[in-house]
Amino acid sequence: MVAALEREVGPLIKRWCRVEREHEGRRFKFFESGRVVVVCGGIGAEAARRATEAVIAMYMPELVLSVGFAGALDPALKVGEIFSPSRVIDARDGSSVEIAAGRGVLVSALTIAGAEQKAKLGESYSAQAVDMEAAAVARGARARGGALHGGEGNLG
């Protein structure tokens, strides 16, 4: 699993083994429990891409999950609800990745979206949620031939 911040996965990793490792000159925090690992790579697309590359290189996972907080664009989605999209769109260039499971669309933006930007993103991409990292995780996993389940997270 790839998350931006520890607080996004805090309850899950509370009792997991914490390991700091280096990959390509950068330090990453990994949390291990049995065959499952979470890496917290930092905020934004570039940090997510590097964390995805690191977890794939070091752990060779069968599945990569992008997890964390997302902003609801659809008023039917409630705070704390789990959203697992079937498609992740990168707002930078409009590229998208289809996800085998899930439903709905998550769009990854460059910055934290305010109310006005959320409305535009929802309308432009027919998206139900917005985040900053899922598209980069999806792109990184696909580039390395990995299976992906993307954008899953609590809505805020």
Image (cartoon, rainbow, N blue to C red):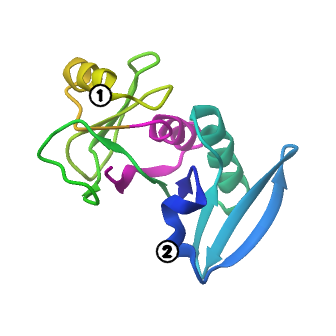
The secondary structure type at the circle numbered 1 is: helix
Residue 58: x percent and y percent?
73, 59
Residues packed near mark 1 inside 10 Å, few (<14), some (14 to 19) or many (20 plus):
few
Residue 20, image quadrant: bottom right
| Alpha carbons under labels 2 and 1: distance apart | 29 Å
115 or 43, nearer to the observer: 115
Residue 51 visible (yes or no): yes
Q: Is residue 154 above or below residue 138?
A: below
Q: Is residue 150 above or below residue 139?
A: below
Residue 147: x percent and y percent?
46, 52
List the residue tagged with mark 1. 115
Amino acid carrying mark 2 in the image: Leu
Q: Is residue 78 magenta?
A: no
Residue 62 visible (yes or no): no
Task: Give the residues in magenta.
Answer: 131-156
Residue 31: x percent and y percent?
65, 70
Q: Is residue 136 magenta?
A: yes
Residue 69: x percent and y percent?
42, 51
118 or 31, nearer to the observer: 118
